[in-house]
Amino acid sequence: MTSTNNYKKKLIEVAIPLEAINAASAREKSIRHGHPSTLHLWWARRPLAACRAVLFAQLVDDPSSLPDQFTTEVAVDTERQRLFKIMEDLVLWENSTNEEVLERARAEIRKSCGGKLPPVYDPFSGGGSIPLEAQRLGLAAYGSDLNPVAVTIGKAMIEIPARFAGKEPAHPSARDRNHHRNAEALAEDVRYYGMRLRDEAWKKVGHLYPKAQLSPAQGGGSASVVAWIWARTVASPDPAFRGAHVPLVSSFILGSKKGRETIVSPIVDRSSGTYAFKVKNTDISKEELTASSIGTKAGKAQDFICLLSKTPVTREYVRDEGKAGRLGARLMAVVCEGKNGRIYCNPTDEMQALAESAGQQEEVALARETFLSGSTPTRAMITGGVCSAYGLSTWGHLFSDRQILTLGTFGHLLEALRDEIRHDAIQAGYSDDVTPLRDGGSGAFAYAEAISVYLAFAINRSADRGSTLCTWDSSAKMEALRNTFGRQAIPMTWDFAEGNPFSTASGNFISNVEWVTKVIEKFVPAAAGVERQMDAQTVEYPDNVIISTDPPYYDNIGYADLSDFFFAWMKRSIRSVFPDSFSVMATPKAEELVATQYRHGSREAADRFFLEGMREAIANMARQSSSDFPATIYYAFKQSEVAQEGISSTGWATFLQAVVEAGYAVVGTWPLRTEMANRMIASGTNALANSVVLVCRKKDEVAETISRAEFIRALKRELPSAIGELQAANIAPADMPQSAIGPGMGVFSRYRAVLESDDSPMSVKAALQLINRELDEYLGGIQGEFDADTRFAITWFEQHGTKTGEYGSANSIAQARGISVESVKHAGIVESSAGKVRILGRDELDADWDPASDGHLTVWECCQHLIRALETDGEHSAAMLLKKIGSEKADAVKDLAYCLYGICEKRSDAKDATAYNALIAVWTELTRQAAAIHDTGGDRQTRLDL
């Protein structure tokens, strides 16, 4: 490794327009058409705006590193603001294909790189955002991942478009247009052959998707079916009904538009032990609508009620029956396309029989025995719910017979379609080279395989919209089919919606093809791209490579366990294209670098596996990456559970420790607010609320060892100017704590070791605490003496008062102080739930609080309880409490009251300002009274002096 001292600083090591990047990243989450996230589902993708900005800032020189060109601070700032403006334009979604904007950015990169552009590599490429943006900026893009689904997504994003960029379409109807840019021809062919695939599939299985006959009241005639609404069924536990199956329904509501409400109404004949479903859309009372909203459940998240006997059907009974393979399905309603919205029809025996007839085809049983025979995740594997607990234990169990037959037909026909595409491509002028796509082929044979990869994605999109885990969204705005992966889980569904892939409604096959083509049309393959299936710990990097990577997030998401859903169908559709990846039974699990307890036997073993593997992967990056540029590593937070005293989120500090031990010096940290506030996984959880980009340089291999005192002196010497630069760049107050970690860790990690007073090496966590203390002293003077929980509370109070705020902002502040939001919650300072955080008001504090028995005592609590005692019970009560608090905390409580008084003044919060002022006003009297108290515990006669 080479020294970290002799290099030109890049923009990302000094300042970036963080607010503009965060705003563009957050907005991007709501963009759908043409966004790569809609090419194929992958979890926790990085926003393109963030990746693009980080790469630009990672490559472009900061003007402070060019003193010959920018001789004054004013000149440096002017140039930096010019670069910021380029970045602010660059991050906008509308400019992602704007060649003028992109070329301005590329020109700056070329200038900083001396005209020779280095390659960029992401060894944890996942959804492919980082390599895609590197390629957009004109850099050779490399990505690798262990997961074959992720690798195929990467190939479709950076490798295939670059290989066939600028070519003409192969299909016979394309002869009247020339000059296709980028991947436009590829998109046109995917659209054309997608329609061919749909038409051929219709010939095979179209008879299974007939139109529905409308009643005279509905206008008569026939209508195309959008979806069939089914209920899972189980034998009634009441022996009187001799095993008759009864429905398990979450909701009977089909449509909830005001004035057009529609429900399924069960008509029960208990004497014969039978029932039927009828659609009802008139004369629905409020009580009937309310009852319909819980289906056959006894209440929300409760047992079911037997429709025939009105007795409970317990979850345990349903689980046992499901595992025994004895759950059934009953058609409840049929949704049709109408001129003025959805038309809901009664189910018929003929429609149910037709759907069930698909099971007579040999292909269905064969699919369940072969490529759909893999196991679905169990509760030990993923969070968010699993269906395996109810007997849906293989991928084949997740699909109805008709769904398996149809999806399998698409996959089977894709094989034959490749021959047609190859023939058309030869006729269009492609070479008759038989080198396959996987070996770098670019002739007609490889092109046909390339088109089939994108059509396989359309099939996978159809599988996501075509399993029995899909439900019907009856909300007034939607009345549409939901997809399988509404969140990162595979939960059980009771009533489900079976979509019609040949309709024109949401989720049909052609619409899925169109989603794919719109993404391809927006690819800008401005450089070569390579995606490989490799382990990050052993990957061999190109020379002079730049690393930008987004590693797995501890144990947040079981990528491999979830991706098997798609892997199974890709085995059917493109195994011949990538035989090495799709000839195995399932995606690699044992080597996946995620801390999953079920794979390693214990939480400790899982954590050890993750951290050792991550340290090795990062060390591999540090050994092989360029010394001329910093590396960037994205980190997303995962909060640990509340344990005993000393609770903190260990993931952040431990990850930083792994980075430093691997051979990197951390020289920058930038908090990125990139996650959607309404993510389903965030409902009721605090997972992945915020992210940080670590900026790293290779550590000097002759780095010296210093003492704790020397480290603190270095912080005091260097941190203020770095914070000043951050403030000059308009870093928001909420982002300042984590942003300041970068220059602080830059001091810490450039040394071989910082020794404590006992000569043991200082941990990163201890260094963070010292960095945070220095930051607090710089920003708030006396605040640096408080405990971390109190310092969090001060910052949060300054920004939000006692109002609710976003967990992401709280997480940023807490992590920068070396603790977690859960720690502050455990201390009794905040309430944290459903992605929101709020400081507790004094009237909400524990009335029986005793500082002597509080195992997580904070200055904040002492101050707030003291004010409450003063306001509620007067000076004597407050003095008694002050005596219990003791002299060690008393001065800090007084300092906090001064600090909070100043904050309230700034916030124009007169009421709270008065409370803190009143405490300070009587402080002398309180301490006098407390000093005279000899017994604070009733029977004890112990003198406690203040």
Image (tube, rainbow, N blue to C red):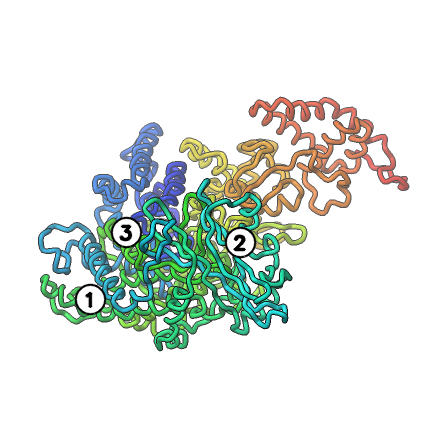
Taking depth in this image into account, of 830 and 199 the one nearest to the observer is 199
Query: Is 809 left or right of 441, judged from the image as shown?
Result: right
Inspect the image, locate mark 1, and give the three-letter code of the amino acid beneath it.
Ala
How many residues crowd around disc 1 within 10 Å: few (fewer than 14), some, or many (20 or more)?
A: many
- Distance, label 2 to label 1, CA atoms, is 44 Å
How many residues crowd around disc 3 within 10 Å: few (fewer than 14), some, or many (20 or more)?
A: many
Q: Is residue 264 above or below residue 721?
A: below
Residue 508: % across, % down = 32, 56
Q: Can the viewer see residue 762 in this picture?
A: no
Taking depth in this image into account, of 916 and 804 the one nearest to the observer is 804
Residue 934: % across, % down = 87, 35
Q: Nearer the viewer, mark 2 or mark 1?
A: 1
- Distance, label 2 to label 3, CA atoms, is 35 Å
Taking depth in this image into account, of 220 and 803 the one nearest to the observer is 220
- Distance, label 1 to label 3, CA atoms, is 21 Å
Q: What residue does disc 1 label?
A: 446
Q: Residue drawn at (88%, 39%), measured in percent from left and top?
A: 938
Q: Residue drawn at (27%, 60%), measured in percent from left and top?
A: 454
Q: Which mark is residue 519?
A: 3
Q: Residue drawn at (32%, 62%), measured in percent from left and top?
A: 210
Secondary element under disc 3, as helix, strand or loop, is helix
Inspect the image, locate mark 3, and give the three-letter code of the amino acid beneath it.
Val
Residue 504: % across, % down = 30, 53
Q: Is residue 909 above or below residue 89?
A: above
Residue 47: % across, % down = 37, 47
Q: What residue does disc 2 label?
A: 651
Inspect the image, locate mark 2, and give the three-letter code of the amino acid beneath it.
Gly
Secondary element under disc 1, as helix, strand or loop, is helix
Q: Nearer the viewer, mark 1 or mark 3?
A: 3
Image-quadrant location for residue 148: bottom left
- Quadrant occupied by the N terminus: bottom left
